[in-house]
Amino acid sequence: MGDRWRVEVDRSLCIGSAQCLHHAPDGFRLDSARQSHPLAPDTDANERVLEAAESCPVEAIVITLGDSGEPVFPPEE
């Protein structure tokens, strides 16, 4: 069984660039204010969701391991 992730978008950072939709169209949506939301906040580890987080120009997408809360992205420095 693979890792489970918790995906969150910091709405105070999101600028509505829609890069997340470009990389993971099944993982995110934009609301009427052009703010991104994960479609499944608790999900299986997914390369496309990781690519979406990595492509976000303001790093508004945070991914953590579902069971431990350990950061997946952005990585701890």
Image (spheres, helix red, strand yellow):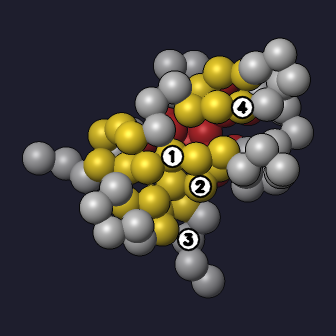
Name the residue that disc number 1 marks: 7
Name which residue lies at 19% across and 48% down: 2
Give the quadrant of residue 64: bottom left
> Are the residues flagged by discs 1 and 3 in contact, CB closer than 8 Å?
no
Residue type at tag 2: Val
Q: Quadrant of the C terminus?
A: bottom right
Identify the secondary structure beneath mark 4. strand
Q: Is residue 31 above or below residue 2?
A: above
Residue type at tag 4: Ser
Give the quadrant of residue 40: top left
Q: Residue furthest left?
A: 1
Name the residue that disc number 4 marks: 36
Name the residue that disc number 3 marks: 75
- Badge 3 or badge 2: first in the primary sequence: 2
**Residue nearest the observer in this picture, 48 or 29:** 29
Q: Position of residue 15 (x, y in %)?
A: 88, 39
- Can residue 44 be spotted in the picture? yes
Cα distance, mark 2 to mark 1? 6 Å
